Image (spheres, rainbow, N blue to C red):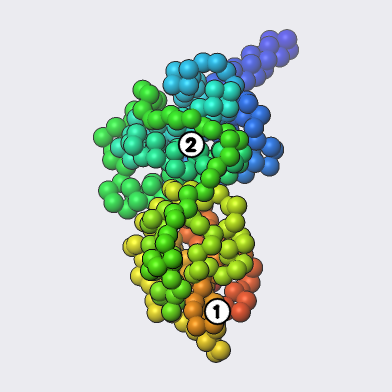
């Protein structure tokens, strides 16, 4: 009897040991304590989808050590087994150190072709830092993840990730680092445009308003006072963090979209420009006529439209309210995605 009990005890001990060896490290380690519980849960859940959708094992660590962030990132990459959740060893590690005010995105071997240093530096400086400077660390992490998803989708559509080095897990220091500027305050980029510049002129049609909007985004002008915005949109954008990377992504995304002709309601006061349902990343645009000119209603869009984890848009709730006239010939699934 004692022998049987001993065998059971040994078996349990061995099992426990194996569990400790294979138990995966968490997706998020907030050692610096800069994220609240709800932010930690949401980031962990969102990053978990990257495994399902793109086979990318993306971890986040906030730390307050005095170690050099490059050496610390490489050591953490190895200790946490970043890439072990991915079938092809695709690993990313974001290390944020508020104490040293540095941020670094460490890229595993299997993703170096998709996320070169120049791209990593770009998303850190043009996406993370503006949010971090406003003290919005969680939003900066998630906004950066959107760009990573977009990059992964484009790589997969173009020629995939490549398979010659997919077996190489680990990292040799590829990536980039920059000053995090956490809590310093961020000044949204806004160009100064002369009154006689055609970009600042009111729009005579929804198409004109949208073309002007794309030109302003391409110029990285995030001013909330553009005349192509409705008053509600101007109020919404006032004081909001708008990053250069966000504006670049809008231009890049819609450059490849096939816009339909504007659809108008019975009074001719509202209009919608939409794209074929198959172009899932291209959300429709809503417009309001003010006097003789058309304005872009980003405020109502923010209430009626959301983007999922694959950057595909879907409607919120049961419909589009007074803009429903533009979608009477479409069907939507139970999650609000057009089909």
Instruction: Tell me the residue at 65%/35% (across/down).
Output: 35
Q: Position of residue 241 (x, y in %)?
A: 55, 49
| Residue behind mark 2 | 58
Q: Residue furthest right?
A: 1
Per the image, label 2 sits on a secondary structure element best described as: strand
Q: Position of residue 262 (x, y in %)?
A: 43, 79
Neighbours of disc 1 within 10 Å: few (<14), some (14-19), many (20+):
few
Q: Nearer the viewer, residue 254 or 308?
A: 254
Instruction: Tell me the residue at 53%/80% (across/down).
Output: 289
Quadrant in which the N terminus is drawn: top right
| Residue behind mark 1 | 290
CA gap, disc 2 and disc 1? 46 Å
Q: Nearer the viewer, mark 2 or mark 1?
A: 1
Q: State which tag comes first along the sequence, 2 or 1.
A: 2
Q: Nearer the viewer, residue 307 or 6?
A: 307
286 horizontally vs 196: left or right? right
Q: Quadrant of residue 33?
A: top right
Give the total number of marks visible in the rendering: 2
């Amino acid at each position: 009897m004692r022998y049987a009990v001993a065998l059971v005890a040994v078996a349990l001990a061995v099992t426990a040991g194996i569990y400790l060896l294979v138990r995966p490290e968490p997706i998020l380690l907030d050692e610096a304590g800069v994220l609240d519980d709800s932010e930690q849960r949401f980031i962990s859940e969102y990053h978990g989808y990257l495994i399902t959708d793109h086979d990318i094992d993306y971890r986040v660590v906030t730390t307050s050590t005095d170690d050099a962030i490059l050496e610390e990132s490489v050591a953490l990459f190895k200790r946490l087994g970043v890439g072990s959740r991915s079938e092809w060893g695709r690993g990313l590690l974001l290390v944020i150190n508020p104490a040293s005010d540095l941020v670094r995105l460490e890229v595993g071997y299997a993703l170096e072709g998709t996320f070169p240093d120049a791209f990593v530096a770009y998303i850190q400086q043009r996406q993370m830092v503006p949010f971090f400077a406003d003290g919005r660390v969680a939003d900066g992490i998630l906004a950066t993840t959107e760009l990573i998803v977009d990059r992964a989708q484009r790589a997969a559509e173009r020629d995939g990730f490549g398979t010659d080095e997919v077996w190489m897990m680990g990292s040799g220091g590829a990536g980039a680092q920059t000053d995090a500027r956490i809590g310093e305050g961020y000044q949204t980029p806004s160009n100064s445009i002369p009154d006689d510049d055609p970009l600042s002129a009111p729009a005579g049609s929804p198409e004109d308003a949208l073309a002007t909007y794309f030109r302003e985004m391409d110029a990285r002008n995030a001013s909330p006072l553009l005349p192509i915005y409705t008053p509600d949109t101007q109020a919404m954008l006032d004081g909001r963090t708008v990053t250069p990377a966000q504006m670049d992504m809008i231009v890049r995304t819609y450059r490849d979209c096939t816009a339909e002709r504007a659809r108008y309601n019975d009074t001719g006061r509202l209009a919608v420009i939409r794209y074929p349902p198959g172009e899932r990343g291209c959300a429709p645009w809503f417009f309001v006529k003010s006097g003789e000119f058309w304005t872009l209603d980003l405020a109502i869009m923010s209430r009626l439209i959301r983007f999922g984890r694959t950057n595909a848009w879907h409607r919120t709730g049961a419909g589009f309210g007074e803009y429903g006239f533009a979608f009477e010939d479409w069907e939507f699934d139970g999650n609000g995605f057009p089909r």
